[in-house]
Image: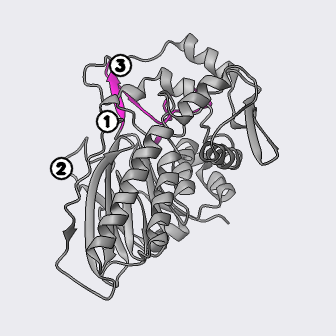
Amino acid sequence: MLEYDSKFLLLILITFILTSCHFENNSGKLYQQQLFTFGTLVDISLLSDKPEQAQQVIGLISAEFDQLHLDWHPWNDGELGQVNQQLKSLKPFSTTASIISLIQQSQSLSEKSNGLFNPAIGRLIKTWQFDQIEDENHSFKVPEQKQIETLLKQNPQMQDIVLNTNNNNTEIRTTNPAVSLDFGAFAKGVAIEKMIQIMKQNNIHNGLINAGGDLKVIGSKNNRPWRIGIKNPSYKQHPDQKKILASIELYNDEALFTSGNYERFFEFQGQHYHHIIDPRSGFPSVGTRSVTVLAKDAGLADAASTALFIAGVEQWQAVAAKMGIDHVMLITTDNQIYLSSAMAERIKLLVNNKSIVVSSRE
């Protein structure tokens, strides 16, 4: 999910001191850079035999991340913030091709997820104040039940947005004044996909974009697959456990995304409230601790990890099949691990867990 912190909206930590690893192969040296954007640390890694090329590509990626972070923020004065203001009028208006694309993709993914992925519930998400999660002085509290019930009755859906194209100009409007867009469960994946395309367009054939543990790779590292560690969702509560739950090797054009209840949350009156809101109840989803999804498209992986988190044990297989997702690991709040058969073939668990269920679509 996107995290919004006004301190960082205009600040991208860019350091053009490129670090090369000690190995060299026919793809060149490994150059790395870290920046802060989209509310998280982003690591850029690429292989090149030309230092100037590496610096240029990393600069392009950094600038693009910076721009998208501003454009896709739902509550500020960027493109999406302006869209949310105009949607209230119920009248048609024009916006950018970037926003139109996000809407179109989200409408399709929302339908395939049975509405569990629903960026139209922006007001509900804002009501939970997770846009203030980085503010140490913010005093969190659970929204009033009546407030949540009112938002649920209005039932905002992506299908409430109407797109009309005339003379190559697409106008949008909504039939439901409660619709407010927050692409936090999707935008990071779309952004990573764009950054991978920047690499390819600039003749970088081996690289990785990692945004807070959500990532996509192209090519290989040192002529081998990219080996990725998957965080143990119980580690923060139980530091005596292993920090890495599992490892997986990723190949060209594969993305790996995880949604969990342990990164963005607040405590109120002794209860834990995380940021993944179930659009059916209006409250944080229950029963799931984390979901990891592997897919070719980073945007799909991002949206699917959220939808399957909400789907939980009873529904994750059906929703995954409808969304076209084969590789899934779901961990429940009682630490039972569910693996799709395809994921079970790829993943290597590094902890002893007797509660492992391998499921197939059949």
Q: Amino acid at mark 1?
A: Phe
Mark linked to residue 101: none
In the displayed structure, 63 sits above or below 225; it is above
Residue at the (51%, 58%) spot, across then down: 298
Task: Specify whether residue 337 is in view.
Answer: no
In the displayed structure, 5 sits above or below 137; it is below
Which of the 4 quarters of the picture holds residue 57?
bottom left
Q: Amino acid at mark 2?
A: Asp
| Residue in the foreground of this view, choosing between 41 and 242 | 41
Labels 1, 2: front one: 1
Residue at the (43%, 52%) spot, across then down: 64
Mark linked to residue 240: 2
The x and y percentages for residue 93 are 72, 31
First in sequence, mark 1 or 3: give its number.
Answer: 1
**Residue that carries the numbered disc 3 in the rendered image:** 140
Q: Magenta part of the protein: which range?
A: 264-289
Task: Specify whether residue 218 is in view.
Answer: yes
The x and y percentages for residue 330 are 47, 53
Residue at the (31%, 36%) spot, across then down: 8
**Residue that carries the numbered disc 1 in the rendered image:** 8
Question: Quick check: 23 left or right of 272?
Answer: left
The answer to whether residue 157 is magenta is: no
Question: Quick check: 172 left or right of 252?
Answer: right
Labels 1, 3: front one: 1
* Residue reaching furthest to the right: 166
In the displayed structure, 31 sits above or below 89; it is below
The x and y percentages for residue 37 are 35, 45
Labels 3, 2: front one: 3
Which of the 4 quarters of the picture holds residue 138?
top left
In the rendered image, the quadrant that contains the C terminus is bottom right
Q: Mark 3 and 2 residues: CB-CB less than 8 Å, in contact?
A: no
